[in-house]
Image (cartoon, rainbow, N blue to C red):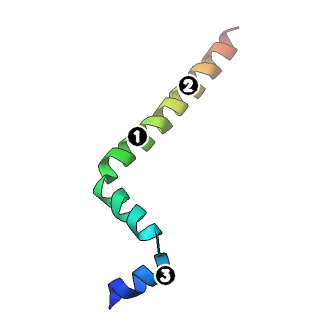
Amino acid sequence: MTDMFLDFMLGPMRGIGDFYFEHQMVFNTVVVGIALFALIRKRKGKQAKEQS
């Protein structure tokens, strides 16, 4: 019965959610990697600005 309600409420998003949950480790790794890259880039930019 719960599946019926989820199918009705989420519609086509249900398939996207299933795909995400199957590959969650890959997606989370990519997101954390992008966040770390942005932090390192921001930190290096501040250091270069302070030195000049």
- Check if mark 1's residue and mark 2's residue have beta carbons within 8 Å: no
First in residue order: circle 1 vs circle 2: 1
Q: Nearer the viewer, mark 1 or mark 2?
A: 1
Q: Which quadrant holds the N terminus?
A: bottom left
Q: Nearer the viewer, mark 3 or mark 2?
A: 3
Q: CA distance from mark 1 to mark 2?
A: 16 Å
Q: Nearer the viewer, mark 3 or mark 1?
A: 3
Left or right: 11, with 28 as reference point: right
Q: CA distance from mark 3 to mark 2?
A: 41 Å
Query: What percent of the width, then of the height, locates residue 3?
Result: 34, 83
- Mark 1 Cα shell of 10 Å, populated few (<14), some (14-19), many (≥20): few
Which one is nearer the viewer's eye here, 23 or 35? 23
First in residue order: circle 3 vs circle 2: 3
Q: Which mark is residue 41?
A: 2
Q: Secondary structure beneath disc 1?
A: helix
Q: As shown in the figure, which amino acid type bears the numbered disc 1?
A: Val
Q: Is residue 13 above or below residue 48?
A: below
Name the residue located 55 percent from the left edge and 25 percent from the top edge.
41
Name the residue located 41 percent from the left edge and 81 percent from the top edge.
6
Which one is nearer the viewer's eye here, 18 or 49? 18
Name the residue located 66 percent from the left edge and 10 percent from the top edge.
51
Left or right: 30, with 46 as reference point: left
Could you say which quadrant of the image residue 15 lies in? bottom left
Q: Which mark is residue 9?
A: 3
Q: Which mark is residue 30?
A: 1
Q: CA distance from mark 3 to mark 1?
A: 29 Å
Which one is nearer the viewer's eye here, 35 or 7? 7
Q: Secondary structure beneath disc 3?
A: helix
Q: As shown in the figure, which amino acid type bears the numbered disc 2?
A: Arg
Query: What percent of the width, then of the height, locates residue 5?
Result: 41, 87
